[in-house]
Image (tube, helix red, strand yellow):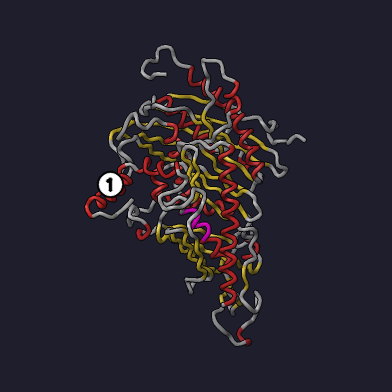
Amino acid sequence: MESSEGTGGLSGEIEVEAYRRLFPLPFYERHLLESVRPDARPLNRARDTTIALGPVASADGSALVKIGDTTMLAAIKLEVMTPSTDAPDEGSLAIEFQMPPICSPSVRPGRPAEVASVISKQLSDVMMSSEMINLKELSLISGKAAWMAYLDIYCLSADGCLFDAALLSAIAAFSHLQIPLVSVNDDGRVIAVFGELPEAKLKLELVNKEKRKLSLGSKPFSLTCILHEEYILADPNAEEESIMDTFVTVVLDSLGQLVSIYKPGGAALANMSTIKACIALTKSRVKELNNILSESLSEMEVD
Amino acid sequence: MEVVRADGRTPNQLRPLACSRNLLHRAHGSARWSQGDTIVLAAVYGPKAGIRKGENPEKASIEVIWKPKTGQTGKAEKEYEMILKRTLQSICLLAVHPNTTTSIILQVVGDDGALLPCAINASCAALVDAGVPLKHLAVAICCGLTEGGYVVLDPTKSEEQKMRAFAYLVFPNSSHSVLPKAPSAVDEEPGIITSVTYGLMSESHYINCLGHGHAACAKISEFLRKSLQTQFPGDLSKGT
């Protein structure tokens, strides 16, 4: 739309914005006919994704992920605890996803967003289903001590595809995680060691001299697509999610196995060809995300 | 090679289904759906005037409350509530009663596997009992995938725990047409309303599950149709 010619052009621009607010669905459908979206993305392209590893220095592993404007901060803290009797050589994992009021005008303090508990549960289901983390690696002394990993994910800005960004930040944080050194002190309790300690103080070294990283299995990555009539829009932003209510989240791991296909209701039905198309879009997204993650990891190692 | 199941069923066999309606007198509609030992009781109140904050006043809104059998409501219950709300929103005709709220309360009476599909079936029957206008019914099934890659329908809890993966699938019910079906209609692919999966599976396994699930839903649709048509001859207060 031209913005020249003073008041005539200006009123033309105001009309477009007003039309966008008053009739969002016809506004979008006009764009979909041209196979493009108002932010000039083609239908199958996801937004720009960046991963920053280690923003939280006090955490054992952390990552800041941005998909478009959606920003997620994930941090992992490890604590020594006694393992349960039915899994004496396994550690455990506690995942918490929170949406503080900073992320969106619709979230108010004191009233947690409903979608936060759902995404939290979805994240723990996906992490358990995919075989990325082997809990046996988190064990220290069988039956006596094991690591408890607390994964906290904070949404700093909610602009659509919250689950995708949260999953990516969790995977990035685990890739960045370094397990600290531990030793057994005089009471026989296992304590974490910070900084340098003279050799005499260390009674027992349980892990290698240097901090070790978790060896991760195949990592799961996800893509959310919106289904509207016969169009499939990849990686919607918040505006698109509010107008078109049917979405499908496909989670694939890097070996191409399906970890989860999540479609909670919605007016549009998904038949086999739609599902296959979503899976194909997710496959290319998985390659993209894997590249971005390995690039950030290699940059970290150089530092 | 046939899969041997603990209770002697074939892989494609469902547990005995039972549906009874109009159990609660204060609720506008109620239904109790059982699949073997998994039993869910659903009650529908509505449409009631007024709408919750943040919902669209031009449409009816659906509110789902899930009560587990024991313990307090946690994240799992919130997830079930959200999935149910979105599934039922897609089958209800929301424009008929704008600015109203319909509440669906689910009480888990027994949990022996396939809990979410049982709840979805129960809420559909309860919505029909309440007379809420619907586009079509939602029929839900649980498909499990064994280690050998075989699809097993309607697993019990012990089977679910041993399985490699399982999927909850919801399809629209099969339609009965008065006109003879045109040949092209047979080729229509089944469209899913809802899909929730747990565990790792390959794409071809999932497509396989969709096929088996759709066939099983046709059977459940038949059962639903028969049980919803049975009515007391003197019952005029609730329409068909």
Q: Is residue A288 above or below residue B56?
A: below
Residue in the image at 33% along x and 41% along y: A23
Q: Quadrant of residue A289?
A: bottom right
Q: Residues within 10 Å of mark 1 (few under 14, many from 20)?
A: few
Read off the magenta span: A162-168
| Residue A191: x %, y % from top left | 56, 75
Residue in the image at 51% along x and 52% along y: A45
Residue in the image at 46% along x and 64% along y: A73
Residue that extends furthest to the front in the rendered view of this protein: A5
Q: Chain of mark 1?
A: A
Q: Nearer the viewer, residue B56 or A151?
A: B56
Q: Which residue is mark 1?
A: A15
Does B26 lie within the magenta span? Answer: no
Q: Quadrant of residue B89?
A: top left
Q: Nearer the viewer, residue A200 or B45?
A: B45
Q: Nearer the viewer, residue B26 or B202?
A: B202
